[in-house]
Amino acid sequence: MEQQGTNLEASPWEAAPLNYAGFWIRVFAGLIDFVILLIPFSVAVSFAAVGMNIWYSFFFALRPGQPLPEDLVRKGPALLSIGVSALILFAGFILHFWKVPTGAAL
């Protein structure tokens, strides 16, 4: 039987085999990561919308088939960049301290 990997935390004289996760375990870990990253993204976008005074257009004035409100057209790209920046920073923060995605660590 072939050894699939080595455990780096084991002593150098004995290499313990690693058991790799299957497809569904990885899907579940990915969903956990998605939910963990979705929460700060939603908070950042909500606070940014209120801070940019486009909260009404962003949350209530969007209707199917209607053109976008003017203030949302002007400030929308900035709002999107703030949200994406917050998502990248939080993901980097998690990866920096955990060294692996959160779902994989669980």
Image: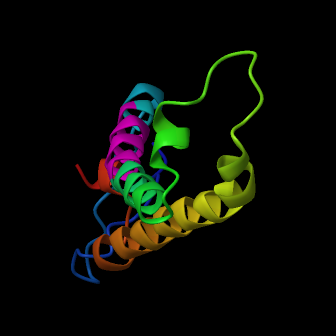
Q: Is residue 19 above or below residue 99?
A: above
Residue drawn at 48 percent across, 61 percent down: 87
Q: Residue at x 73, y 35 (%)?
A: 68
Q: Position of residue 72 (x, y in %)?
A: 66, 48
Q: Is residue 8 left or right of residue 87?
A: left
Residue nearest the observer in this picture, 27 or 38: 38
Towards the viewer: 88 or 6:
88
Q: Measuring 42% from the left and 54% from the top, which residue is drawn there?
A: 41
Q: Quadrant of residue 102?
A: bottom left
Prevailing SS of the magenta stretch: helix
Q: Residue 13 at x, y = what percent?
A: 26, 81
Above or below residue 39? Residue 93 is below
Q: Quadrant of residue 44?
A: bottom left
Quarter holding the N terminus?
Answer: top left
Residue 18 in view = no
- Where 10 sits versus 61, above or below? below
Q: Is residue 12 visible?
A: yes
Looking at the rendering, which quadrant does residue 14 occupy?
A: bottom left
Which region is colored magenta?
A: 28-39
Instruction: In the displayed orientation, state which residue is furthest to the bottom.
Output: 12
Q: Is residue 83 left or right of residue 105?
A: right
Q: Is residue 99 above or below residue 23?
A: below
Q: Is residue 30 magenta?
A: yes
Describe the colour scheme in one phrase: rainbow
Give how far across and how far down residue 105 sits, in percent: 27, 55
Residue 89: give x, y in percent of width and height.
Answer: 46, 73
* Camera-nearest residue between 27 and 80: 80
Q: Residue at (74%, 49%) from the top-left corner?
A: 73
Instruction: Tell whether position 22 is magenta.
Output: no
- The residue closer to the viewer here, 49 or 28, is 49
